[in-house]
Amino acid sequence: MIRTQMIQSTDEKMKITDQILHNLPQWFGNEDALLVYVEGVKDKPLFAAYYNDELAGFISLKINNAYTAEIYVMGLFEKYFRLGIGKELLYKSEQYLRENNYRFLMVKTLADSCDYEPYKRTRTFYSSVGFYPLDELIEIWDKDNPCLIMIKNI
């Protein structure tokens, strides 16, 4: 059984983010970047997912403007992949955003011009839940890590 809840405690947000991202080295292997995410979730909406009452994953949202939010960071322990938890986290996030009158949700991920299998799965997930590629930029990260911006109408 999947249960999600919005986390209010700053300390709990950081603890959840740190715990999960440190278990996803294929996606979050850069310790400096990981620590930026852990610090960055403090002032952002964060939903945690529990599978049979065990922490399974989380999603944190960044509000960009009056119409658009983005997935700031999202992660699930690998043993919970493909159980519908990511989709449930996204559903709860979109519900929250619609209730607060946002129209679009975007996400930044590694572009497919960089052939790295873990992010191929990430892009496949986002496509499967209704995100579309908007633009690929090297100015956001760097030429070795081209950023694909994907967007969804919510």
Image (cartoon, grey):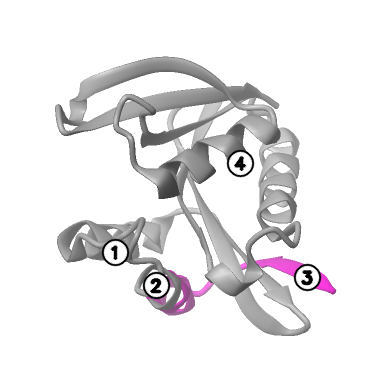
Q: Could you say which disc has been placed on residue 131 in the image?
A: none
Closest to the camera, between mark 1 and mark 3, is 3
**Residue 139 in which image quadrant:** top left
- The residues tagged by marks 1 and 2 sit, at their Cα atoms, a distance apart of 7 Å
Residue type at mark 1: give it. Answer: Glu
Closest to the camera, between mark 2 and mark 4, is 4
**SS of the residue under disc 3:** strand
- The residues tagged by marks 1 and 4 sit, at their Cα atoms, a distance apart of 26 Å
Q: Earlier in the sequence, mark 1 or mark 2?
A: 2
Instruction: Name the residue located 51 percent from the left edge and 43 percent from the top edge.
Output: 122
Residue type at mark 4: give it. Answer: Phe
**SS of the residue under disc 1:** helix
Instruction: Name the residue located 22 percent from the left edge and 56 percent from the top edge.
Output: 33
User: Magenta residues, as a range?
Assistant: 1-18
Residue identifier under label 3: 3
Q: Earlier in the sequence, mark 4 or mark 3?
A: 3
Viewer-closest of 49 and 64: 49
- The residues tagged by marks 1 and 3 sit, at their Cα atoms, a distance apart of 25 Å
Residue 62 is inside the magenta segment: no
Residue type at mark 2: give it. Answer: Met
Residue identifier under label 4: 125
Q: Is residue 8 above or below residue 82?
A: below
Residue type at mark 3: give it. Answer: Arg
Q: Could you say which disc has been placed on residue 39 in the image?
A: 1
Residue 39 percent across, percent down from the top left: 29, 64
Closest to the camera, between mark 4 and mark 3, is 4
Closest to the camera, between mark 1 and mark 4, is 4
Residue 47 visible in rendering: yes
Residue 65 percent across, percent down from the top left: 46, 26
- The residues tagged by marks 2 and 3 sit, at their Cα atoms, a distance apart of 19 Å
Q: Is residue 84 above or below residue 106?
A: below
Q: Are marks 1 and 2 in contact (CB under 8 Å)?
A: yes
